[in-house]
Amino acid sequence: MDRRQKKTREAIFSAFTQLLSEKNISSITVSDIIERADIGRATFYAHFETKDFLLKELCEELFCHIFDSTLDTPSSHNHIFECDAHDELFLHILKHVKNNDNQILKLLSCQNNELFLNYFKNGLVKLIESQLNTFENEKSKELPKDFYTNFIASTFVQTVKWWIDHELNESPEEINEYFLKLI
Amino acid sequence: MDRRQKKTREAIFSAFTQLLSEKNISSITVSDIIERADIGRATFYAHFETKDFLLKELCEELFCHIFDSTLDTPSSHNHIFECDAHDELFLHILKHVKNNDNQILKLLSCQNNELFLNYFKNGLVKLIESQLNTFENEKSKELPKDFYTNFIASTFVQTVKWWIDHELNESPEEINEYFLKLI
DNA sequence: AATAATATTGAACAAAGTGTTCATTAATGA
DNA sequence: TCATTAATGAACACTTTGTTCAATATTATT
């Protein structure tokens, strides 16, 4: 990929994320974005069809960040599915949220973040489905599988959201414990 | 309140809800709404400052429907707080969702419903806080109170959402059982 | 039934935003 | 060095927004 394209794309993402943390998405205009990103109007439309697509791609990118970083953590044996137990999986994600990426925080804590929350949740659903046996207990056997999977994923997402709303005062380990007590 | 005002307000809500179930909120224009509601442009702006405020007030209204109906159910002794047990509270809401109001379904199942989900959740949080002792168990005592309250509320909302996504195939009683097993 | 108050109408309006075009310029990779 | 590709900016038609106002219709009240 051309360096120029990459830079422009990142400038747009950065400008958009900034604006998202400042005001409601419906009042952010393309003109706002290109002014902040310091690019031409035509350039914006060469990259993104509409504002909606921009949001979608930003969500996808941040979503990948979360899980890619989890995959790369040494203690996860280079692959998330090789986690010894499911509590490691969640702890890795929590650590990543705390340390690396405040773009994620902005998206998770801003209004109109349903889209990103859904990406986050649905990504987890897939992971959990693939190692569902790890999560089996008395509870889960009496419930529809997809209902239980959905429950774990959305509870985790809600936990992260709660944590962010509390300004990440607690440690990842504490939050992980809270979460594990719930499920 | 003047009959005309009431009719116009309802026509706008109805048109907007229809449109919400048809397309993304960001592509719904004020012109779409007034055409569907068959009212004049000036009339719309006499009622709502912007589209965002319209959504906000619609959410508030539907949210009140849910809880007002719960309050009015005979078996709740005319007041939600007098529920014998918390499982009745949730069952009432589930029954209401199933029977009465498909506007609620549309809002809960459409995209960009974060706002309404939040109203729903936050309303529950307040109810649960006021009778938190009912929910106490081994789990809850080891967790921050607001964390646990938030957990119950968002798990219930997620449960309702799952149910709607499954087209309400299950009975309110079944869903209530599922939910109670989780918490 | 008459009246005063109020809601709706429709047309018109400036201002702002959208999405596209294109010839020109600049940066890139090979 | 050079062919390729990306960014530019100005211009464009078009849509959407939010407001104004005089005219009209509906309402609650008496």
Image: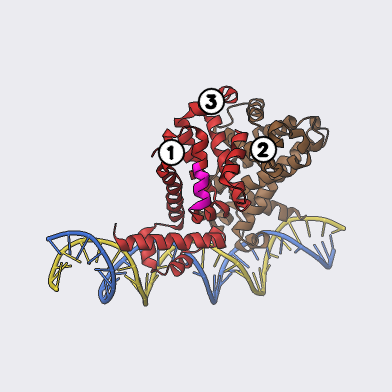
Chain colours: A brown, B red, C yellow, D blue
Q: Relative to D30, is A101 above or below?
A: above
Tag 2's secondary structure? helix
Is residue B93 on the magenta stretch? yes
Residue A38 x %, y % = 60, 54
Percent x, y of residue A58 = 65, 50
* Crowding at mark 3 (Cα within 10 Å: few <14, some 14-19, many 20+): few
Quarter of the figure with the C terminus of chain A? top right
Residues at marks 1 and 2, CA–CA distance in whole angstroms: 31 Å
Q: Is the N terminus of chain A in the top left, top right, bottom left or bottom right quadrant?
A: bottom right
**N-terminal-most mark, 3 or 1:** 1
Circle 1 residue: B76
Q: Which mark is residue B136?
A: 3
Residue A130 shown left or right of residue D26 in the figure: right
Q: Quadrant of residue A142?
A: top right
Quarter of the rendering containing residue C15: bottom left
- Residue A152's tag is 2
Give the number of the disc on residue B111.
Answer: none
Which residue is at a point 54% across and 56% down the rendered structure image? B106
Residue A13 pos. (x, y %): 64, 50
